[in-house]
Image (cartoon, coloured by chain):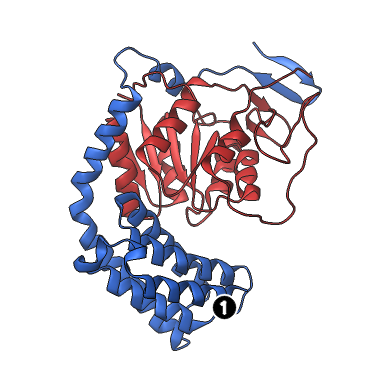
Amino acid sequence: MSKRTHPEAREFALDTRFQKMVRREGGVSREAAVARAADEIEEVKPRYDEWLEGELQQFASLIRKAERGEAEAGWVETANFQTRALRDSATMLGFELLAFIANSLCEILDAVETGSECNMDSIVCHLDALMLARQRSYRHLKPDQVPDLTKGLRRVVKQVTI
Amino acid sequence: MANPKMNLRDLAILVADPSSYIAMLVHSMLRGFGANKVQDVRSSIGVLQVLTEQRIDLLICDMRLPPHGGLQLTRAIRGKRDNENRTVPILMMSADARENTIKQARDAGANMVIAKPISPASLYDRLSWIAFNPRKFIDTANYFGPDRRFKIEGYPGGVGRRKGDQEVAVAAESGPALAQDDIDNLFSAVRTGQD
């Protein structure tokens, strides 16, 4: 089974239970699996509103504390984590404007995490944009349908991440 | 990437993501693929607890899973000699798709990295790749995990570890994010020779 390839190295073939089980009869084709997954996602979409509202409130509270200088050390990492979750969920559900704004904010927070100066105004203006885009009347818009907003955010990102 | 049919029924799958909604979305996708035994946890401590108590067939884990992070968690799982889950396939989800980060995941012992945000098609393809492209395991003093030696095709400045492969060209600094195809190339290229 195993063979020596180096005095300290052991190499061995492994058929995991996952691999064995996946190969059983009765599997689902890619096409069917992807279509069913999309249907399953549709079913959990209604819970998005509640989750989004909670996440944005927590995020806003964190940013307000940071503005007052009362946030705990590591708040940028927390903010970045929350923003990534907002971006990823919005992308997965097809809410393009929310995803665009969150991604733009991720760029700023990534830069801060890697040593750029933290510009609170740039973060707050993204928070305001997120609050706007969460509204039902904006949520299904695409970034190019609100060019003033998206161009403005891009300018902000460019300025603070250089 | 070939995609034979996958049967996920009765497989114990653990989804570890700090965001409850992201975990719910991944859970939904897996349910759509036919999985019926999916659990989720929010922390690396939760993962280790589950792995101590029961056999898990597949771990889908976020790279930034608090408090340890996905890389440290993967090393801990691969390093635990007395645990039956030591060889569990690990699919790492990462919003950070820079080359250096992907290589760190590979070197920690992850089977594959999937870039966030995840789509049903990308998740299906990555699971299919893990299932139908098994790699040998390597056990050395400082690494335990799927064989990392492979030839890179299609990615400039690729990584080679065997005779005939390209020279190692690992970026010292963080670079631009990789597309999922490039991530796949970092994991998937066929081995081209023997030591």
Q: Residue at x 33, y 71 (%)?
A: A130
Viewer can see residue B26? yes
Q: Residue furthest bottom?
A: A68
Above-or-below relation of A116 to B10: below
Residue B36 image-quadrant placement: top left
- From the image, tell me which residue sits under label 1: A159
Badge 1: few (under 14), some or many (20 or more) residues near its Cα, within 10 Å? Answer: few
Q: Looking at the image, which is closer to me, B75 or A140? A: A140
Q: Looking at the image, which is closer to me, A1 or A76? A: A76
The percent position of residue A90, horizontal first and vertical second, equals 33, 57
Q: Residue at x 50, y 57 (%)?
A: B67
The percent position of residue A124, horizontal first and vertical second, equals 41, 80
* Chain coloured blue: A
Q: Residue at x 75, y 25 (%)?
A: A9
Above-or-below relation of A148 to B9: below
Q: Looking at the image, which is closer to me, A147 or A101? A: A147
For mark 1, give the secondary structure.
Answer: helix
Q: How many marks?
A: 1
- In the image, taking residue B19 as reference, residue B105 lies left or right, namely right
Above-or-below relation of A111 to B11: below
- In the image, taking residue A9 as reference, residue A128 lies left or right, namely left
Above-or-below relation of B6 to A124: above
Name the subunit of mark 1.
A
Viewer can see residue A57? no
Residue A135 image-quadrant placement: bottom left
The residue type indicated by label 1 comes to Gln
Q: Colour of chain B?
A: red
The percent position of residue A98, horizontal first and vertical second, equals 34, 63
Q: Residue at x 73, y 41 (%)?
A: B157
The percent position of residue B24, horizontal first and vertical second, equals 29, 47
Q: Quadrant of the C terminus of chain B?
A: top right
